Image: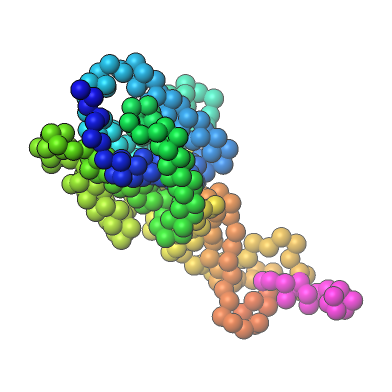
Amino acid sequence: MDSNDGLRKGPFLWGVFLITFSLLIFQILQTRILSVVAWYYLAFFAISVAMLGMTVGAVWVYLWRERLQSAPLPETLSSFALMAAVAMPASVIFQFCMVNSVALSATTLVAWTLLLGVMAVPYIFSGVVVSLALTRSPFPTGQVYGVDLTGAALGCVAVIGLLNLVDAPTAVMVAGAISGLSAVAFAASAQGVERERLQAKTWWKRPGPVTVGLLLLVLFNALSPARFRPLLVKDDAEVSLTKVFEKWNSYSRIRAEQPLVANPPLWGPSPNVPLGLQVPAVRMSIDGAAGTTMFHYDGTRQSISNTTWLAWLTGCPASIRRR
C-alpha cells in the first residue's frame, strides 16, 4: 500500500508554499547580513551557498530514496521542515560568533569553510522538503511546482516589508517560525494512522510547540535590548553603548552614534567657516563602513549657517547665488 494514499491536498500545498516562502526570505536576509558584517560582493557567496545547500538536499533524497520511500511522506516533510525552522536562527547566531575577515591565510580558509557549512544547513533541510514534495506527492507536479514558485516569489517581496518592521536577525527568526508553520501544515496533511503517529511524538519533536517557541524567540529579539546582533562588523567590534539609533531596511543598515560637539568634517568648506568651529553632530554609518555626519538642525537657518550649503552660498559670487 502506498504510504501517501489519503494525503490531504490543502495542508500539503500550504506546507510547500510556506517552506519556499520562508526559504527566499532567509536567502535574501543572508545577503543583507553579509553586506553588513563583511562586504557587498559576498551577496554572491550567499546565493552560491543557497544553491549548494538545496542541491545537497536533492542528492540526499536520491541517495536515501529507498529509506525515505518507506516512511510516511507527511511525517518526513514535517520533520525536515521543522529542522530547517530551527536551523535558520541557529545558523545566524553561529555566524555572528565567527570572524568573517578576508585575508591571505589558512585561518581565513578554515573560518570561511565553517561559515559555508553553517549557512548551508537550513538549505539542505529545505532542499529535502522541496525535492520530496515534487517527486513523491500524489498531486500533479506542475501544480506543486506552481505553488513552490508562488511562495518563493512572494517571499522575495515580503522581505522588503519585513526589514522595514524589524532588524535582520529578528527577520531570520521570523523566517524560521514560518518554516515551522510549514511543518505544522505538512503534519496536518496526514490522515488516519499517520496522523495519530505524529500526534504521539514527544513535544519537542512536534511542529506545534517548536513553532510557538520560535515565535517567542521572535518577540524576545524584537523587544529586548539584549537581542542577537553581530559582534564584528567589517572586522571591528561594535560598541553598543555608543549607539543611539539603528535601523535595517532592504538595502542598508543605518546606525547613529552618541551626539558630540566637534569640528565638522567638511569637503571643500566655505572660507567663511571659522577655524576651530565646534558644532553638535551625530556620526552615522551605513552597513558598518560608509560614514557620514548629521549636523544639528532645530528648524532655524542659524543652526546650520556654518555647516551646510548656506555657508557655502554666503561665500560665493552673487551671480552663482542667483542661480
What span is colored magenta in the figure?
A: 307-323
In terms of image quadrants, where is residue 192?
top left
Q: Nearer the viewer, residue 60 or 90?
A: 60
Q: Which of 157 and 100 is in front in this view?
A: 157
Residue 37 visible in this rendered orientation of the protein: no
Residue drawn 45% across the image and 63% down it = 245
Indicate whether residue 195 is drawn in magenta.
no
In terms of image quadrants, where is residue 132?
top left
Rendered-image quadrant of the N terminus = top left
Residue drawn 46% across the image and 40% down it = 146
Where residue 186 sits in the image (x, y, percent)? 27, 39
Q: Which of 108 and 88 is in front in this view?
A: 88
Residue drawn 23% across the image and 35% down it = 6
Where residue 260 sits in the image (x, y, percent)? 51, 67
Rendered-image quadrant of the C terminus = bottom right
Indicate whether residue 310 is drawn in magenta.
yes
Q: Which of 291 and 118 is in front in this view?
A: 118
Tell me which colouring the rendered structure shows: rainbow
Residue drawn 47% across the image and 24% down it = 109
Where residue 261 sits in the image (x, y, percent)? 54, 69
Q: Is residue 228 above or below residue 42?
A: below
Residue 91 left/right relative to 76: right
Q: Is residue 315 above or below residue 219?
A: below
